Amino acid sequence: MRNLLQFIVQHANFLLFLLLEVVAMTLVVTSRNYQRSAMLTTANSVVGAISSTATDVFDYFSLRQQNTALAQENAQLRSQIDAYSKFVPDCTFTTLDTCHRIVRAARVIDLTTWKSNNYFTIDHGNTDGIESGMGVVCQQGIVGVVGKTSAHFALVIPIVHSGIAISCRLKKNDYICFTHWDGVNYRYASLTDIARHIDVAVGDTVVTSGLTGIFERGLPVGIVDRVSLNDGDSYYHVTMRLSTDFRCLDYVYVVDNPYHAELDTIQSSISL
Amino acid sequence: MQYTRYILLAIAMMLLQLLLFNNLHFLGICHPFVYIIILLCLPMNLPRWGELLIGAGVGLIADMVCSSPGVHTAACVLVSYLRPMLVSRMVQNAERLTDMVSGITVGKNVFMGLIGILIPIHHFVVFLLEYWSLSQFGWVLLATLLSSVLTIIIVTILDLINR
């Protein structure tokens, strides 16, 4: 006993070092799953508030750019209205059309693109009606899924996170595949599950499938950039260039499907 | 007085890390973690357990700033553990250095040696835990090398300005 005490006293600093490292590694390991706490990230209220103030200040430098982007989006939406009004002259929409609604527009106040598990923080949280599991899109295409929310901030898991797979389709033949990010370049992601008999070529457009209920069908995801098939492989190796440039991400829209919970319940009851 | 100055420096460096250095993505792979200067310039008359706890605290705040739970804590605790051993090897009677460690108080060569060893160790741990896969070990080494060089340059410039 005396020896043990003596040992502890003699190596107190080393033992404290080990203890602190174990605590740190526990944090690292537990944060690898999606249910991680928002506390130790920029969705934390103090750091979030500082980042969002800084974003407010730096806003003024990009006003012109933002204006151009919004004007472009306006033009695009106007042309879409024109196109739709040809089909639906009196503009009556059914429930299915309004299935996905935009909960609100949000600013990205902090993001990384260099880690293998990237996250970014937006400046609205559950007091604004944002909940985990909602989809996040931007003008260019889809962005990711809300992972965790705090009162005023939310942490979003983007496509450029190695643990997320988004269900999508090849636009030309509606073939369903999944995105996978290998953790290196934030402009590119690969597509899995494309069997060798499928017709896929460089330049094909990839859009969301609408199968999981998070995103509506047909939102841009990317453009096929490289296709390769080794002898003996049953699946193509496909790389696509993502529509969303994550380093330029600023305003995003959080979308919600009011029937998501209902859809989930019925789908999980079938799989049993 | 010295403590006020140190705490102000620490707050300033964390804010710089959050607002400036986190947004530097030189060559897409260079990510300087300049906040580490907070731990490198601690005075030498602290008890070692105190330095370890400060290291863990700074690491936790850096984790919040960089959105990476535990990663910076692990790296900072390691730096806090190694630094006193390293300084006492490089400088005689290190305990009498009651002032902040800098290029002036320990000498330019010793300071360069100190940051030249500890910054790459810190960056290596951060990138290793952040990428979390051995298949990208080459990428981790490259990121460590380039980012350490950038951090060392920035820390040296800050040390020169601080005179």
Image: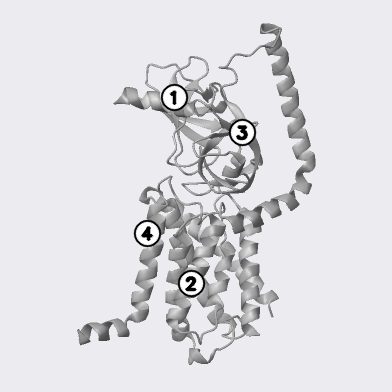
**Chain letter of the residue carrying label 4:** A
Left or right of B67: which side holds A269?
Answer: left
List x then y, in percent, for residue A169: 48, 21
| Alpha carbon distance from label 3 to label 1 | 19 Å
Q: Are marks 3 and 1 in contact (CB under 8 Å)?
A: no
Q: Do labels 1 and 4 share a chain?
A: yes
Q: Which chain carries label 2?
A: B
Residue A211 visible at all: yes
Q: Between tags 1 and 2, which lies in front?
A: 1
Q: In which quarter of the image is residue B75?
A: bottom left
User: Could you tell me residue B6's position as x and y percent?
Assistant: 62, 78
Total numbered circles: 4
Determine the secondary structure under disc 4. helix
Q: Residue A263 carries which label?
A: 1
Say what amino acid the circle numbered 4 marks. Thr
Give SS at disc 2: helix
Q: Say which residue label 2 marks.
A: B55
Residue with the mark numbered 3:
A103
Name the chain letter of the residue that bears numbered label 3: A
Q: Are marks 1 and 4 in contact (CB under 8 Å)?
A: no
Q: For the residues marked 2 and 4, what is the alpha-carbon distance in whole angstroms?
A: 17 Å
1 and 2 marks in contact (CB < 8 Å) = no
Is label 1 on the same chain as label 2?
no
Determine the CA span between mark 4 and mark 3.
35 Å
Q: Name the residue under label 4.
A: A26
| Residue A232 appears anywhere in the view | no
